[in-house]
Amino acid sequence: MTLTTRQITTRQGIDGEVLQGGSGPDLVWLHGAGGTTADDPLLKRLTERYTVHAPIWPGYGPHETEHHIETMLDFTLHGWDVIDALELSGAPVLAGHSMGGMIAAEMAAIAPHDLARLVLLAPAGLWDDAMPVPDIFTMLPYQLAEVLFHDAAVGEKLLTAGRSFDDDAALAAFMVDRARQLGTAGKILFPIPNRGLARRLYRIGMPTTIIWGESDRLYPLAYADHWSGAIADCTVETVAEAGHMVVVEQPDFVAARIG
Amino acid sequence: MKFCWFNLMPWPDLPEDFRETSRSVWVDIDSKLFDPERANVVYHEYMDQLEFADEMGFDGIGVNEHHQNGYGIMPSPNIIAAGLARRTSDAAICVIGNSIALYNPPIRVAEEFAMLDCITGGRLVAGFPVGTPMDTNFCYGQIPALTRDKYNEAHALIMRAWAEDEPFAFDGKYTQLRYVNCWPKPIQKPHPPIYIPGGGSIETWDFCLDHDYNYSYLSFNGYKAGQTLLDGYWDRVAERDKDESPGRAAFAQIICVADTDAEAEQLYAEHILYFFNRCLHVHPGFSDPPGYRTLKTIKAGKLNQLRKEAQEVFKNLTWKDLVEGGFVIAGSPDTVREQMGHMIKSLRIGTVFGLFHMGDMPDWKVRNSTQLFAEKVMPQLRNIWPELEGDDRWWPTGMDGRVRHDDSLARARLPGVRPKGQA
């Protein structure tokens, strides 16, 4: 089913877009540091079973970077402000990938009674000295695919999406997008993607599904144990032939595991 | 016209195959390359050279702040400046500068700069860089998108701390202090001349113009490459309806003086090439973390520096390229004087940060070049800007009757004699 764009304004007065489509129970999707689009294969599959609401995070849409959202608490409360603005009839399923998973987990910890279920896909937010996460902020565009995808060659094509950086306009647009998007992500992921979430995970009481690509080279699979060890009602699903971009690499499998 | 003798303090022993064996000279440089016992000699040699420049009559001697950097072993320029403060009497001490977003709390900068201004007798030039991404974000962990905001807050705190004569509370986003009471205070009122080193950021131009601070374009690409950027700055000055005093701008330039043009190449080429081929080998992933540059600056920026070819620009440079491209002003005193005169006029700068020690240049060559410049180049260029006469906004004048090096050295050797009548 197609996703359409809905305009919202939060009670703080921040304008934004939400990709919306499908029918069934409400599922709120928080995208990762690379953003999302209406063509996302996982979102399309989720519309078959859910009413999907995928807010575009400030800095990722057509609007300039949002300067009021700076700290982890700002991010968390903005997430709840967006859900309030959606005016849903009941507690939704909240799902998030990578950075979106980190924000979703923070939202779940701060308001554990307001969600039906939580789904975290290779979430950021924890740090283990024995498994340091590669520093995406120092990576050159051609180095990203190797870290993000199970199959780097396939990933390379997905990342560049047919753009050629020999073209000045394309390169300029890429640089502006990169500055806005990863600049925003850096507020909670730089220099170490840890804002103390581990101390708050005990508050997550709702049924939680953790989904992880088996060949994730950004957040190694072993991070899943840290999550499942800290969240009481938690199931871990691993995904074969998938890296950190599990959501685009295995959308059918992931959609089935989300339930 | 002010001439400041600047030493970056590079590590002189990077191996010949450094480019092939190391990813970067900065941030994650192989720390095994640093030899602390060798550094004992290196630091003293570099500080001696700065003191020699004072002896030679340079208007200023300059130091700066870099972290985890193979071409700058000066994470704390204030420590070097403190040493220089006691051993020199005339030159301004130019600390260009302290990356104020990195000090926690930034009142530390207000205190240390005030100490330096008191010890030097009002000879401090205070630099406030936003800081490079390598230093600020990757070595010192500041969040790129918030760095400028934190810098602005630190600047507000420092300037107010110097200006106020009552304790005040400071409720900042990054720093909260219940009792700000800067003690000591600088001699220079309302504050020492402020220099803002910058790349091409438009916000930095406006920041300088808002406060009448000097804008210092510090690059290693030389005066020909710097022309476009400084033209942009002067356009902005005109747009903002500010006076066009050359004191508003400074520029860093590599300078090599010998008896003849041919001798300049023979004496200095290998050391300049050491700098360009080893010291500037920075992993490109460290140079532009998303969020560090503002969207306005990115949109106004040149794209070709982002392309892969641009990362390799320094690889194949020869001495001829460096001289013809203006990266280096080198040659006989006549040659250097002519080019410097042209550079100063065309860039419209009131201060030159002269880079005389570069790369692994041995001490005697540094002194040779420095002395030739001081004796045969500088005097003819001193009065190139008659309009700067009496314009004291951009340079310290020094306190009358300040303690001088010779006096303090003599006093340091006196035995303690109890005054008559004291128990």
Image: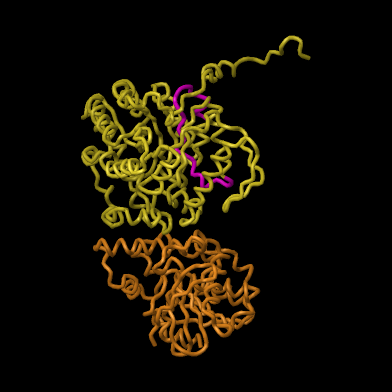
Q: Is residue B359 above or below residue B173?
A: above
Residue B104 falls within the magenta-colored stretch: yes
- At 39% from the left and 51% from the top, the residue drawn is B24
Q: Is residue A140 left or right of residue B228?
A: right
Residue B95 falls within the magenta-colored stretch: yes
| x and y, in percent, of residue B158 in the image | 55, 41
- At 42% from the left and 31% from the top, the residue drawn is B394
Q: Is residue A171 left or right of residue A30?
A: left
Q: Is residue B96 above or below residue B306?
A: above
Query: Which hue is chain B drawn in?
Result: yellow
- Foreground pick, A31 / B323: A31
Q: Is residue B137 above or below residue B371?
A: below
The extreme right residue here reads: B423
| x and y, in percent, of residue B222 in the image | 29, 40
| x and y, in percent, of residue A157 in the image | 31, 73
Give the chain coloured orange: A
The answer to whether residue B361 is visible is no
**Which stretch appears magenta?**
B83-105
- At 60% from the left and 37% from the top, the residue drawn is B164
The extreme front residue here reads: B241
The answer to whether residue B365 is visible is yes
